[in-house]
Image (spheres, coloured by chain):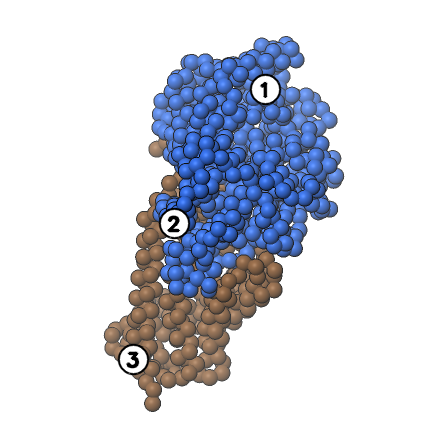
Chain colours: A brown, B blue
């Protein structure tokens, strides 16, 4: 009988390396590139604190998107909030029971919401795909990779939901497998096709992250238009400090 | 080269905002500005004509630019093709050409960047839309990067703040470095380096012009309002776009500044060495050129021994001054530390209104119902006054103090969502007239709406390019060119000269 444990162990070590190494290299590359001129999109905050708030609104509320297109904002919100809940729910597979101290209660608390998150994710992704297929402007700017990325995320979500609602897997064994990866104490992985498919797709997502448009996630923090303070070329003396 | 159909404008809508048009692929592929002649390029240190190994040179230049600007690198890496920007560009709204969707315009560069500088583009170019810089793609670069006025409207709506202007500037710089410059910008920059202003107006002609204006003002008002030139030891150096010296309605603005200074009793001067606020080097994406132009201002301020630096009504010039001036030509510590550097003339005038230093009588503009066009570079790339958004409130406050009635255009078309006039970013040239007309559609439409619903008679602007562009395109839409006013032209009509301040 096929024992997927070792294969997936190697796969996940490799993809983790690619993710961390690739992303690290990219972020370092961005960080090392000079910012020769101040180009904040104005009106912009005049203090660092203001910039932190602006960025926080951008990444939690998608403020610019809200001002642009409400339908796109809704789909994007459904997907990202769903993904967040799902990710929090998955923490229980990666962490030993009770590791986070009192925060563990949150992981427990979020479990049922993770399910709704999975559904929201699916709805959001289908909405985004529908736009890409049906709106002429969005269709015109879409490439193969844009559809593949949506397909990948939809497949990850669908296989995950299917394991919850249709074909259950041995989640205790799954947890043991991933905890084993963390502690280098390899454990077997159930050979359920749905589970293996799910994990394979997640590994693929991790591997392409640093080389794809998923870079938008760290990218927004590096965007000079959004992270720079508005400051006059040479303020008057009292403002010069 | 200025091909295309006769100048028939696209139809206006009953609503204040233009609906996005259906896609019309290639509709504007023919639009290209005149290519710079060898002398224009060489004067700026670029190859005169397209170099033999232009592809390799272009890739090399792109690599250098990407490594010298985090904005460019992050913007090229981060786009998810969500389409949030797709319907935000005035040139797209006016033409329907899909390459005028900001994301598509960026992709003209992104394709090449991906092909040569990213693993995905090297391994699977077809999948991620990566492509080599072919002759055909270069043609598209030349065409469509001269259909971007670098107004930043798209960046306002991008969830990552991706600014097409940065990419457009980089593309133009790459083209300059392989000897494919644009005549309009490069020729003008050559004039600035040689003579000191975009018009190539030498000192004697400038002195003559200013003297003529002084006579006109005295004849009209009975007041000896001066327009001093190269006065060493003056307190204020005014840097203003050279169009202010004689174009209409710009010159009314210049007269307005002079009247404000006169009434405040300020000692001020213009400079013949730095007789230009505009800095077209920003449009072609060259920091070196931008610094060279800005250093004329530094030189003039030093030579004349002034204490303050004030800029006249010019959009991109205010961006360059407000945001970049110290980086390009600092330091400015020889000026009076009590004043910020630079100041906008509207900051001077607004403060003068607030403190009672000048008195404005709206009766001077009797019968006018005025709206205000936020200039893109002022709105989205700079500030006025003390807090964020002062660039919106100060001009409106000054206009409201000068006219009997003020009306704003529709919300989605003002403040940081303002539409470009259609002629910014180095496109204000007759060989792009069709593009300018079509790009003006969203703004003209919003203007027309307040003309019809609110009885607006005039639109005030604070940018030399906007004023010239509107004076030219409004008649194409059946509106009167004289609707366009300088904000300080309105001040000029309203100001009470000689009236003793409180």
* Depth order, front residue of B474/B193: B193
Q: Which secondary structure lies at badge 2?
A: helix
Pointer 3: what residue?
A6
Chain hosting mark 3: A
Discs 3/2, front: 2
Residue contact between numbered discs 2 and 1, judged by CB atoms under 8 Å: no
Q: Which residue is mark 2?
A: B56
User: How far apart, in angstroms, are the residues tagged by discs 3 and 2?
Assistant: 47 Å
Q: Residue at x 57, y 59 (%)?
A: A140
Quarter of the picture containing the C terminus of chain A is top left
- Return the x and y of residue B225 as percentages of the image width and height: 57, 13
Which image quadrant is residue B357 in? top right
Q: Position of residue B151 (x, y in %)?
A: 53, 41
The residue positioned 51% from the left and 62% from the top of the image is A143
3 and 2 marks in contact (CB < 8 Å): no
Asked if the residue under mark 1 is in contact with the one under mark 3, i.e. CB atoms within 8 Å, the reply is: no
Kindly identify which chain the residue marked by label 1 belongs to: B
Dot 1: within a 10 Å radius of its alpha carbon, few (fewer than 14), some, or many (20 or more) residues? many
The secondary structure type at the circle numbered 3 is helix
The residue under the point 44% across, 69% down is: A86
User: Can I make out residue B163 in this image?
Assistant: no
Q: Is residue B20 above or below residue A89?
A: above
Above or below: residue B461 compared with residue B236: below
* Distance CA(mark 3)–CA(mark 1): 82 Å
For residue B58, above or below residue B498: below
Q: Residue B415: name its quadrant.
A: top right
CA gap between label 2 and label 1 equals 51 Å
The residue sitting at 45% across, 13% down in the picture is B231
Residue B255's tag is 1
Q: Is residue A22 visible?
A: yes
N-term mark: 2 or 1: 2
């Amino acid at each position: 009988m096929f024992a997927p444990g070792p294969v997936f162990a190697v796969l996940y070590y490799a993809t983790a390396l690619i993710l961390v190494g690739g992303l690290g290299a990219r972020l370092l590359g961005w960080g090392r590139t000079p910012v020769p001129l101040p180009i904040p999109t104005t009106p912009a905050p005049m203090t660092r604190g203001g910039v932190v708030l602006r960025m926080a609104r951008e990444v939690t509320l998608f403020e610019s998107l809200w001002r642009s297109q409400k339908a796109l904002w809704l789909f994007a919100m459904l997907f990202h909030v769903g993904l967040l809940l799902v990710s929090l729910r998955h923490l229980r597979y990666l962490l030993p029971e009770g590791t986070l101290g009192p925060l563990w209660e949150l992981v427990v608390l979020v479990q049922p919401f993770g399910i709704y998150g999975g559904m929201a994710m699916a709805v959001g992704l289908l909405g985004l795909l529908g736009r890409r297929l049906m709106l002429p402007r969005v269709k015109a700017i879409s490439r193969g990779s844009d559809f593949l990325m949506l397909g990948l995320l939809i497949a990850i979500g669908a296989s995950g939901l299917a394991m919850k609602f249709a074909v259950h897997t041995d989640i205790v064994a799954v947890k043991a497998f991933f905890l084993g990866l963390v502690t280098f104490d390899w454990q077997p992985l159930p050979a359920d096709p749905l589970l293996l498919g799910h994990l394979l797709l997640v590994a693929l997502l991790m591997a392409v992250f640093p080389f794809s448009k998923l870079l938008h996630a760290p990218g927004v923090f590096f965007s000079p238009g959004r992270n720079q303070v508005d400051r006059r070329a040479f303020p008057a003396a009292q403002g010069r400090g | 080269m200025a091909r295309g159909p006769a100048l028939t404008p696209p139809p206006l809508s009953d609503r204040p905002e233009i609906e996005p048009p259906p896609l019309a692929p290639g509709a504007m592929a023919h639009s290209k500005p005149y290519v710079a002649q060898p002398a224009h390029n060489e004067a700026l240190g670029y190859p005169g004509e397209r170099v033999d190994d232009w592809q390799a040179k272009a890739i090399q230049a792109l690599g250098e630019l990407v490594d010298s600007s985090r904005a460019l690198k992050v913007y090229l890496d981060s786009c998810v093709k969500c389409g949030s920007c797709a319907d935000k560009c005035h040139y797209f709204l006016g033409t329907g050409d899909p390459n005028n969707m900001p994301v598509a315009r960026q992709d003209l560069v992104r394709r090449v960047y991906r092909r040569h500088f990213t693993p995905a583009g090297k391994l699977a170019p077809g999948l991620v839309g990566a492509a080599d810089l072919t002759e055909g793609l270069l043609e598209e670069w030349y065409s469509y990067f001269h259909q971007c006025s670098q107004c930043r409207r798209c960046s306002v709506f991008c969830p990552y703040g991706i600014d097409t202007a940065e990419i457009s500037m980089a593309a133009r710089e790459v083209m300059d470095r392989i000897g494919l410059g644009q005549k309009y910008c490069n020729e003008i920059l050559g004039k600035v380096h040689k003579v000191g202003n975009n018009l190539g107006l030498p000192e004697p002609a400038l002195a003559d012009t200013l003297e003529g204006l002084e006579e006109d003002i005295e004849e009209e008002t009975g007041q000896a309002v001066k327009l001093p030139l190269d006065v060493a030891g003056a307190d204020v150096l005014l840097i203003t776009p050279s169009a202010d010296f004689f174009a209409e309605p710009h010159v009314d603005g210049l007269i307005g500044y002079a009247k404000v200074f006169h009434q405040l009793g300020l000692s001020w001067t213009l400079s013949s060495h730095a007789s230009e606020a505009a800095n077209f080097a920003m449009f072609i994406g060259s920091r070196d050129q931008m610094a060279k132009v800005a250093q004329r201002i530094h030189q003039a301020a030093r030579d004349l021994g002034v204490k303050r630096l004030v800029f006249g009504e010019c959009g991109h010039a205010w961006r360059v001054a407000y945001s970049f001036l110290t980086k390009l030509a600092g330091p400015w510590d020889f000026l009076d530390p009590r004043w910020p550097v630079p100041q906008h003339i509207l900051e001077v005038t607004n403060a003068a209104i607030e403190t009672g230093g000048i008195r404005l009588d709206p009766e001077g503009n009797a019968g006018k119902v005025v709206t205000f066009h936020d200039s893109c570079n002022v709105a989205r790339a700079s500030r006025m006054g003390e807090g964020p958004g002062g660039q919106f409130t100060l001009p409106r406050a000054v206009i409201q103090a000068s006219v009997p009635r003020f009306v704003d255009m529709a919300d989605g078309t003002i403040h940081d969502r303002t539409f470009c006039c259609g002629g910014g970013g180095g496109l204000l040239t007759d060989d792009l007239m069709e593009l300018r007309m079509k790009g003006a559609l969203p703004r003209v439409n919003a203007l027309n709406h307040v003309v019809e619903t609110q009885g607006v008679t005039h639109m005030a602007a604070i940018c030399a390019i906007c004023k010239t562009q509107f004076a030219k395109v409004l008649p194409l839409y059946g509106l009167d060119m004289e609707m366009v006013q300088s904000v300080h032209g309105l001040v000029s009509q309203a100001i009470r000269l000689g009236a003793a301040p409180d």
